[in-house]
């Protein structure tokens, strides 16, 4: 898990974050980044960034489906197991708790094992889209 803390959440900060995995992950490996549909992840500078960094593959999670996205699940774990139980009165303490969580997480990483096939997921999504209005847009 690669982490980076910034006081603002804008495209410039996201671009700084994009450089971090490139330094930490061996050069021979491709890097797949899953991101949500937040506006900072879709600026022209971010859209063109992978062209200059071909080993990076940027993927979006569908709007409204953060429950399917592992980064969102990771942040839920961070919130439930570290932040809510802590007592941070200043930003620096919160940032240190987050850094500590990342370091602890990285000491014993475990792969996530999907229990549903891609076809099952797509079938469920198609069924859902058929039930909601204006899903063709």
Image: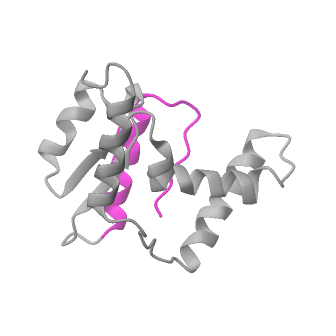
> Hey, which quadrant is residue 16 in on the image?
top left
Q: Magenta segment, which residues?
A: 1-25
| Residue 70 screen position, x and y as percent | 47, 56
> Hey, which quadrant is residue 128 in on the image?
top left
- Residue 82 falls left or right of residue 37: right
The answer to which of 109 and 98 lies nearer the viewer is 109
Q: How is the image coloured?
A: one colour
- Residue 120 falls left or right of residue 95: left
- Residue at horizontal 55 percent and vertical 54 percent from the top: 73
- Residue at horizontal 66 percent and vertical 56 percent from the top: 78
- Residue at horizontal 38 percent and vertical 44 percent from the top: 35
The answer to which of 88 and 76 lies nearer the viewer is 76
- Residue 31 falls left or right of residue 62: left
**Residue 118 colored in magenta in the image:** no
**Residue 16 colored in magenta in the image:** yes
- Residue 56 falls left or right of residue 121: left
- Residue at horizontal 43 percent and vertical 70 percent from the top: 115
| Residue 133 screen position, x and y as percent | 37, 20
Q: Is residue 3 visible?
A: yes
Q: Residue furthest bottom?
A: 108
Query: Is 60 placed above or below 116 here?
Result: above
In what quadrant of the picture does the C terminus appear?
top left
| Residue 47 screen position, x and y as percent | 22, 33
């Amino acid at each position: 898990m690669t982490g980076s803390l910034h006081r603002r959440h804008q495209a410039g900060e996201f671009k700084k974050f994009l450089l971090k995995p490139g330094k930490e992950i061996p050069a021979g490996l491709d890097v797949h980044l899953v991101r949500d549909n937040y506006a900072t992840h879709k600026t022209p500078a971010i859209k063109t960034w992978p062209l200059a960094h071909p080993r990076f593959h940027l993927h979006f999670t569908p709007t409204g489906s953060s429950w399917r996205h592992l980064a969102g699940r990771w942040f839920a774990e961070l919130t439930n197991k570290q932040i809510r139980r802590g007592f941070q009165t200043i930003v620096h303490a919160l940032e240190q708790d987050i850094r500590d969580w990342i370091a602890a997480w990285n000491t014993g990483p475990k792969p996530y094992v999907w229990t549903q096939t891609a076809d099952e997921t797509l079938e469920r999504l198609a069924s859902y889209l058929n039930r909601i209005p204006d899903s063709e847009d």
